[in-house]
Amino acid sequence: MKIAVWILSDYKQQIGGGFALYDKFIQLIDSWNFSNGLDVCFVGYNSPSHYTFRKKYIQLQFSGVGFLDKPLARISHRVGFLNRHQQSILHSNGVDMVYYPVQGFRKIPNFPFVVSNWDIGHKGSFAFPELGMNYSFDYRDKWYTKGIFKALAVFAESKTGKEELMYFTRLNPDRIKIVPLFPGGVVDVKAEEEVQLAKLKELRLNSQRYFFYPAQFWAHKNHYNLLQAFAIFAKENKDIQLVLTGYDKGNKSYIKEVVKTLGLNERVVFPGFIDNEAMLAVYRHASGLVMPSFLGPTNMPQLEAQMLGCPVLCSDLPGHKEMLGEGALYFDPADPMEISRMLKKILEPSERASLLSKAAISLSTTSFTAENALRQLDHHFQSLIPIRMSWGNSDKIF
């Protein structure tokens, strides 16, 4: 069975954790030797200038497409839809199925496909602007009430994610497979201690004297309650900073106003986007990662922090607990007093040592690794062979 992995035309670093996960996954898939019976390649609209693939890449052409398909393809990495001409290109290359490594589409695919699913936040979380306004809820809901049922399989990132998807969609559980979340490329970066300290100096940070929160400035990332907690914490801890990295998604100016109102201008640092080498240094030398996100089921920074020896404090979401077990401190993300207590607790040497020890044990048994994700992807692709090969590869069928 030949599977084409969809390469997104405009998926950029500004997307945040989704890009880091996608980017690493594409590179891992390209280097993975899939089992006998599986032929994996890549497909996309544009020439993949930022990738040099070992596996075959099929470039779709725009000739013969409808007048709306070309602009849609250019402005949205989630078009998904393939017209007759593009289907023919896939058929002529022997492609049996397309794998979309990100979730959701603005147009529902019309070719046999499998798709990843990271969350169903518009149903499982609160009605934040990015989830419930500006037609965001409508196009998400169209996908989850109609489109997702056309997938041969859906790859959830955790057991919690599978349960959440079953609860909100009633999708057949046999069609939901788990391909676990894993750390991003920052854990693979090699940098000497002197280089890391130089990066900290550039950012005007002192080792072990700051907390770190890498997140885009969305409302659901919950910077507000973290700042309320940090204001309480800062009264007794005068030389600790809070580092907030990430791109603005419309909420950054408001968060900066909150910082100003709380009198934290000298204590909160906004470096913007930082590269992986700087990210490595910040993780390695932080007092702790603090992740108060309202949205799960899981998030990638905690896995990165654990692998890099950084203590983790995060919201008490079921998916976070599934990932980290006893290797993290948990808090109610809507309770600034509780968050503040966790910030204070992790500064105690005995608490820090105990947590890092538990995190090491958790890491030794975790399923949330890149290698396991690839093994599971390979296994699930194999399990779909008898299903997909029940019909031929022909334009006449579709």
Image (cartoon, helix red, strand yellow):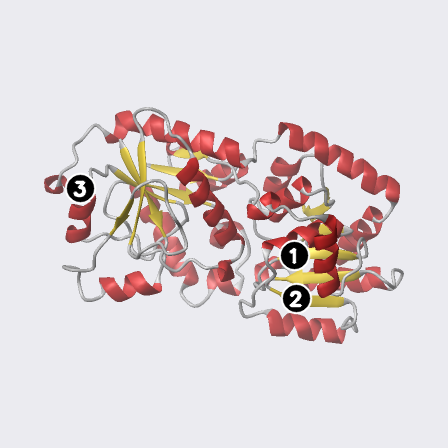
Q: Residue 91 carries which label?
A: 3
Say which quadrant the N terminus sits in: top left
Image point 66% across, 51% down: which residue? 280
Q: Is mark 3 on a helix, strand or loop?
A: helix
Q: At which x and y percent is residue 221? A: 60, 58
Q: Which of marks 1 and 2 is nearer the N terminus?
A: 2
Whether residue 172 is visible: yes
Q: Which of marks 3 and 1 is nearer the N terminus?
A: 3
From the viewer's perspective, tell me whether residue 296 is left or right of residue 55.
right
Q: What element carries label 1?
A: helix
Contact check, label 2 and label 3, Cβ < 8 Å: no
Q: How crowded is mark 1: few (under 14 residues within 10 Å), some or many (20 or more)?
A: many
**Residues at marks 1 and 2, CA–CA distance in whole angstroms:** 11 Å
Whether residue 168 is visible: no
Contact check, label 3 and label 1, Cβ < 8 Å: no
In the rendered image, which quarter is residue 148 located in?
Answer: top left
Q: Is mark 2 on a helix, strand or loop?
A: strand
Amino acid type, residue under disc 1 in the picture: Ala
From the viewer's perspective, tell me whether residue 174 is left or right of residue 207.
left
As displayed, is residue 80 above or below residue 366? Answer: below
* Residue identifier under label 2: 271
Amino acid type, residue under disc 3 in the picture: His
Image point 40% across, 51% down: which residue? 51
Amino acid type, residue under disc 2 in the picture: Pro
In the rendered image, which quarter is residue 62 located in?
Answer: bottom left
Q: Which mark is residue 278?
A: 1
Image point 23% across, 52% down: which residue? 82
Q: Earlier in the sequence, mark 2 or mark 3?
A: 3
As displayed, is residue 105 above or below residue 14? Answer: above
Q: How crowded is mark 3: few (under 14 residues within 10 Å), some or many (20 or more)?
A: some
Q: At which x and y percent is residue 26? A: 42, 44
